[in-house]
Amino acid sequence: MPENMRPREKLLQQGESSLSDAELLAIILGQGIVGKTALDIANHVLINHEGRLRYLMEATVDELTKEPGIGEAKAVTIKAAVEIGRRISIGQQHKITIKSPEDVKNAFMEDMRFLDRERFRVLYLDRKNGIILWEDVSVGGLHSSIVHPREVFKTAVKNSAASIILIHNHPSGDPTPSKEDVETTKGLIEAGKIMGINVLDHIIIGYDSYCSLKNKGLI
């Protein structure tokens, strides 16, 4: 590969924003294997997973090592890089203030609308509705055995949150709340009253639209 097309050299000459997803991943991988460059391996991984960088966050080390050209050391390096990015993101969240469901949509819809499994996320807010942090409480179906008040409120107590907002996605793309969505939300609202922590809203994310249970008058 010509020197000016190699990911590392390209980053040095043009900056990190000029690199494609595959080129960034190739730099993390460092080296290729016999017959394949690091960029070949990176392209293969992303193509196999529809170009989704989120796969790198969702996959376990064991799952990553099943990808051709990725051993345990490279898998660990990938997970460490993703975790650094996640922690930086969390560190920036306090700058976001939530004034309406639209603010929640603007901050989180792009991240959640194409997930292939339901992910239940909780925003923990201070007294001025600024985000202290957010946390994914569960992955999978939304029901009481997975979304338990204990899991939702322990982080709120630990971080002295004044209120919380619930978010989850519908992989079908339709954000219409189910009966179970409403019942689970009402249960968490009641638990929040006991804890002295308000549940302000529950936002459901679809492909290109969202639903606020509060705006719908469902809570």
Image (cartoon, helix red, strand yellow):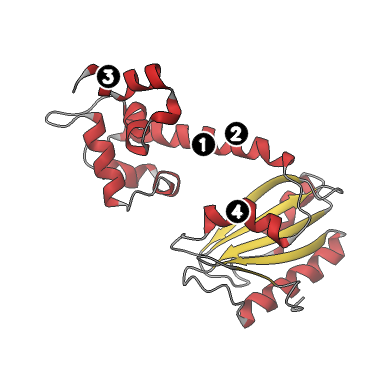
Q: Is residue 102 left or right of residue 169?
A: right
Q: Is residue 14 left or right of residue 46?
A: right
Of badges 2 and 1, nearer the viewer stands 2
| Residue 141 in sight | yes
Q: Which mark is residue 65?
A: none
Q: Is residue 9 above or below residue 217?
A: above
Identify the image quadrant of the N terminus: top left
What residue is pinned by disc 3? 4
Q: Closer to the N terminus: mark 3 or mark 2?
A: 3
Neighbour tally class for label 1: few under 14, some 14-19, many 20 plus, Cα within 10 Å: few
What's the amino acid at mark 3? Asn
Of badges 1 and 4, nearer the viewer stands 4
Tell me the distance, in whole angstroms, between the alpha carbons under discs 4 and 3.
36 Å
Residue 71 falls in image quadrant: top left
| Dot 4 and dot 3 residues touching (CB under 8 Å) | no
Q: Is residue 88 above or below residue 200?
A: above
